[in-house]
Amino acid sequence: LQRMYDLLSDRGSIYVHLDWHCGHYVKVLLDEIFGPDNLINEIIWCYGGGSRSRKHFQRKHDSILWYRKGKEYVFHPQYRPYTPGTLQRGLTKKKAALYHFNEKGAILQDWWSDIQKILSPTARENLKYPTQKPRALLKRLILSATDPGMVVADFFAGAGTTAAVCQ
């Protein structure tokens, strides 16, 4: 993590994906290296899928810690389509004077439930790498924190999804 910090540009940031096993330990290290004030968000990635535990709640989310190196980091908000209910209700008379529907959709918050994990062994995207992330997740992260032409590093490479998304 220290070497990753050293390699980041002053406008750069880092996303660290963690599950419930080690998230709290790694956050302490990231706070030490980046500084606790440089934590931008803890993004909760929620997903569904089969699980039948009778001894605990189903573990259906991971955390993505997003840290910046400098104060002038890159951020491009990401959007999701409005729900049919939101579109159907529209804006109240009181809100209509202050707000409008953004043509891009609703701005994303720090919990994402619209991108599913790659669970099916026959899924087209599944390259059989145990910690492979969906392209849609990496695309969202990369688009939110980079400008065209910036360097994106994946220090573990895994299934090569990051490189594929960048290309």
Image: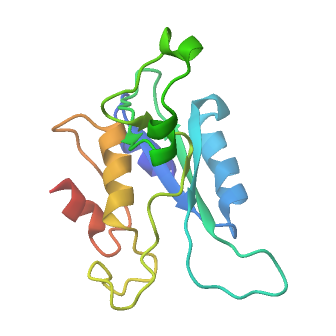
Q: Position of residue 136 (x, y in %)?
A: 34, 59
Q: Residue at x 69, y 67 (%)?
A: 20
Q: Is residue 84 left or right of residue 145?
A: right
Q: Nearer the viewer, residue 104 or 55?
A: 104
Q: Residue at x 33, y 91 (%)?
A: 122
Q: Residue furthest top?
A: 97
Q: Residue furthest right?
A: 55
Q: Quadrant of the C terminus?
A: bottom left
Q: Nearer the viewer, residue 95 or 147?
A: 95
| Vertical comparison of 126 with 41: above or below | below
Residue 165, quarter of the rendered image: bottom left
Q: Is residue 29 left or right of residue 133?
A: right
| Vertical comparison of 22 with 153: above or below | below
Q: Residue at x 38, y 44 (%)?
A: 81
Number of numbered discs overlaid on the protein picture: 0
Q: Position of residue 146 (x, y in %)?
A: 29, 38
Q: Residue at x 36, y 39 (%)?
A: 144
| Vertical comparison of 128 with 42: above or below | below
Q: What's the coloring here?
A: rainbow
Q: Is residue 154 visible?
A: no
Q: Position of residue 63 (x, y in %)?
A: 60, 57
Residue 77, quarter of the rendered image: top left
Q: Nearer the viewer, residue 114 or 128?
A: 114
| Vertical comparison of 146 with 101: above or below | below
Q: Position of residue 104 (x, y in %)?
A: 31, 34
Q: Is residue 13 visible?
A: yes
